[in-house]
Amino acid sequence: MTNYTRISIYIDLIFCLIILPLLIMLVPVEKWIIHHTYFMLTLIIYIYLLYFTYRKVNIPGLIMQRKFRIVVLLMAVLLFITWAISQIPIPKDDFINSPRDWGIRQHIRSLSVWFFFLVVTGFSLAIELMFELFKQILSKQEIEAEKNKAELSLYKAQINPHFLFNTLNALYGLVLTKSDKTESAFIQFSDILKYMYTQTTLDTIPICNEIEYIRQYVDLQSLRLNRHTHIDFHTETDDEQAQIPPMILITFVENAFKYGTSSDIDCTIYIHIAVKNGVLHFATENTIMKEKKENTPAIGIENCRKRLELLYPDRFSLTTVQEGKQFKTQLTIQLQ
């Protein structure tokens, strides 16, 4: 049973078992049951049927669907039935002293019928309107969630080819130079591929898995680099099972290797990953050894930023800044 159904049942029970009986007590029930039994039973049955008619038909929903003819027809039928019940005459054998008293009592009874009609109508329409708005909000949230899920899938799909393209370039360089590290590089590359196609289908993974994946990537890149590029990779975590989205950090690491390595000039790539008290701290820093081509969009970083906006709205901070020849990335995510 959904929360919506459960709440609906609770409201029906409260109205039928508490509110309506209290409203009925406002009229002279004892006298009417004795002297106007037929009328009283008819009135009670009618107001309960009226309530469930409204609840079943859902007039606000019909209005939103622009089914105005059905609404008008239904209201006309209900108004006619209400009028007919209000016109049920007081029995002649009732203890009425004069035609004037008979008219007053008939008028009071007619007003009582219309009073119940207005109360039940107002309450029912208010409840249905509330539920209709609630359903509209839920529907909008579901559509937004599906949209976000589709966008996340798209960004993931774009990250993998981007990563593969850069890694294959590195392997191609090793093959061209006939490096004795080529075999080891391909073994590590196969391990990375295995990770990509087993872990990236999940929404979140333990931080220890992501760290190990980045370590493998760093080792793979180290095979093609010479002594001029120094890699400072440091990690610390107080919770190795802390959950993060897969491949959310690799783009920044990849960027550092793409633009921060050199075969003839000393340079350093700094990578730091830490998880403390449910907060992920990630940083990279590298000397800019290769200039980025003008008007070339940073697809990887922009995709990561969009993923973060969808996954951690108002719970992350991402800055990328260039200070002279140094490029720095700082990312903080509130995981809990």
Image: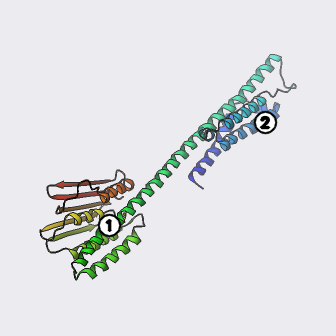
Q: Does residue 281 sit above or below 111 in this rendering?
A: below
| Res 49 → quadrant | top right
Residue 223 spot, x, y in % from top left = 22, 76
Q: Is disc 1 surrounded by few (<14), some (14 to 19) or many (20+) residues within 10 Å?
A: some
Q: Are marks 1 and 2 in contact (CB under 8 Å)?
A: no
**Image point (13%, 71%), residue name:** 228
Residue 221 spot, x, y in % from top left = 24, 72
Res 242 seen here: no
Q: Is residue 191 left or right of residue 148?
A: left
Q: Is residue 84 left or right of residue 2?
A: right
**Mark 2 element type:** helix
Q: Give residue 37's mark.
A: none
| Mark 1 to mark 2 CA distance (whole Å) | 76 Å
**Mark 1 element type:** helix
Which numbered disc, 1 or 2, marks the residue that appears first in the sequence?
2
**Image point (30%, 79%), residue name:** 186
Residue 304 spot, x, y in % from top left = 33, 58
| Res 87 → quadrant | top right
Quadrant containing the C terminus is: bottom left
Mark 2: which amino acid? Thr
Provide the residue designation for mark 2.
Answer: 42
Mark 1: which amino acid? Phe
Res 12 seen here: yes
Q: Give residue 163's mark.
A: 1
Q: Nearer the viewer, residue 286 or 212?
A: 286
Q: Nearer the viewer, mark 1 or mark 2?
A: 1
